[in-house]
Amino acid sequence: MDEIINRVANSKLVTIDLEDWYQEGVRTVFDIKDWLFEGLLLREKDFRAQVGAHDWSQYQDHFIALTCSSDAIIPGWAFMLITTAISPYANKVVIGDLVTLETQLYEAQIATIKISEYKDKPVIIKGCSNKPVPENAYISLVQKLQPVVKSMMYGEACSSVPLYKVKK
């Protein structure tokens, strides 16, 4: 009987699963809408009082997305002020939603990749994941790897979609 050979396992194909780079921790959206007068107007004195009275320690080791869900125009310093108060506790603070937060977390991880490890290699970027991987993370990874890889695919080794191949 012929031996079954796993050609994928024996190939030079490098699989990247962005889910492996997921940073564990609580994600929290902090909405300042309730700190605005009638949900629309930021009054500096009242706002500063809210920031000063808030218990920021409850966000210890959280990843924070600062936002305002009302249509108010928020001055830039307001988010900066909150950041000065929450930064001693939070792992990361961004302005935006959870997708923005997740994108920035992944981009920080992608920035640390040593692209020399992927030079002239066929790479497959795994697609399905159980953790939230924003689409922008895939885009950032493609941009980082394309200058050095031999080829790039998306999906699983058994059913991948070709994305890029070096022209001969």
Image (tube, helix red, strand yellow):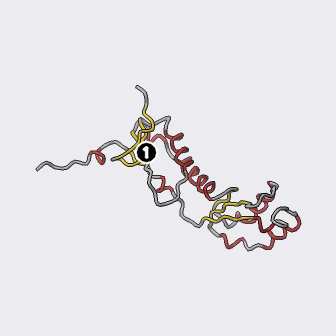
Q: Amino acid at mark 1?
A: Tyr
Residue wearing tag 1: 154
Left or right of 61 on screen, residue 162 = left
21 lies above or below 39: above
| Residue 47 visible from this viewpoint | no
Residue 18 coordinates in the image, percent (x, y): 48, 52
Can residue 151 be seen here? The reply is yes
Q: Residue furthest left?
A: 1
Where, quadrant-wise, is the C terminus in this rendering? top left
The residue at the point 50 percent across, 34 percent down is 147
Residue drawn at x 80%, y 68% is 35
Compared to residue 148, the image places residue 51 above or below, namely: below
Label 1 SS: strand
Residue 139 placement: quadrant: top right
Q: Residue at x 80, y 59 (%)?
A: 78
Q: Residue furthest top?
A: 168
- Seen in the picture, residue 33 relative to 133 is either above or below; the reply is below
Image coords of residue 12 (percent x, y)? 34, 42
Q: Residue at x 76, y 62 (%)?
A: 84
Q: Mark 1, residues whose alpha carbon is within 10 Å: few (<14), some, or many (≥20)?
A: many
How many numbered badges does the structure rendering display?
1
Q: Is residue 5 left or right of residue 111?
A: left
What x and y, as percent, mark residue 91? 63, 62
